[in-house]
Image: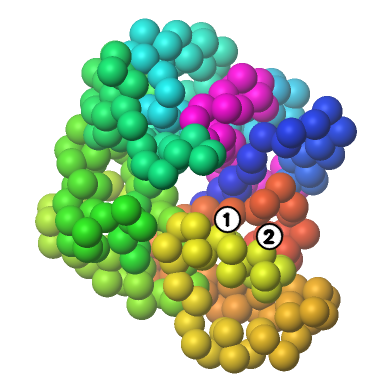
Amino acid sequence: MFSLEFFPPKTEEGMSELFETLREAKKLQPGFISVTYGAGGGTRDKTIEIVKRAKREIGLESMAHLTCVGHSKQEIKGLLDEISTSGIENVVALRGDPPRGEPRFVPNPYGFRYASELTAFIHGSYSLCVAVAGYPEGHIESLDRETDWGHLQEKVEAGADFIITQLFFDNHHFFTFERSMRERGVKVPIIPGIMPITNYNQILRFTRICGATIPDKLVKDLEPIQNNLDAVHRYGVKHAIQQCEELLDHGVAGIHFYTLNKSKATGEIIRSLRG
């Protein structure tokens, strides 16, 4: 099963372009799409609008991201009521990133502190499928990987149905992470997250933000072609195909693609894997 992640655009023009992309994405027959939730919950209305329209108008099974940031428990309940009564059956439960300009996460005094608490609330109150985030290289705020993976175990024990991982470019990180989670008794599916490299400088920014690393070989190969977008695109697609083939041979239940609202590279990868 392949799934695709998108984010809410900032403008009406961007929204129109996104829905054109979603219509094209439908041809790839993804198992589901997910739509992110801006830092501080800033895009919550757009997130819910997109998942509702994507399912109603295009027929894409859709999953809404939902974060603890900036929301009281009552506000979270209102959002979940809207999601569940709209026919959406899936959510990604996240703690969320601090609002732009704030150095660290500060929980709402009337809200949830952790994704595990949000997961437990959803699991106990709604008939929704709940995904949570996993970090093969550890969350950027964690003291170490083992501590972070312990927190993920708590999210699963709180009722998560499956895990979607942060992006990574070396499958060794995923295999180590997956093995550790299985040794901890985690049995739910773990879906690796893959982001095709299509812009060298962009991927450097993303990895700095999320704490993922780029293998030295990729850096060495990409630096000489970094200003040739076509060459970077071809290299990135080829690397992602190789990653995905190895992951599928390993027996993963699916692959989740971070599309950056563009379906060309993801489409090339999926068609190659199916071909």
> 180 or 27, which is in the foreground?
180
* Camera-side residue of 148 and 29: 148
Q: CA distance from mark 1 to mark 2?
A: 7 Å
The mark total stands at 2
Q: Is residue 118 visible?
A: no
Left of 39 or right of it: where is 20?
right
State whether residue 183 appears in this view: yes
Spot occupied by residue 68 in the image (x, y as percentages of width and height): 38, 27
Q: Residue at x 60, y 78 (%)?
A: 239
Q: State which quadrant residue 173 falls in.
A: bottom left
- Start-end of magenta stretch: 26-50
Label 1: how many residues lie within 10 Å, few (<14), some (14-19) or many (20+)?
A: many
Up-down relation of residue 220 to residue 273 (above or below)? below
**Magenta-span inclusion, residue 27:** yes
Where is residue 14 shown, x and y percent of the image?
A: 81, 37
Residue 81 position, x and y percent, is: 45, 9
Q: Amino acid at mark 1?
A: Phe
Residue appearing at x 59%, y 63% in the figure: 205
Q: Which residue is mark 2?
A: 266
| Residue beneath disc 1 | 257
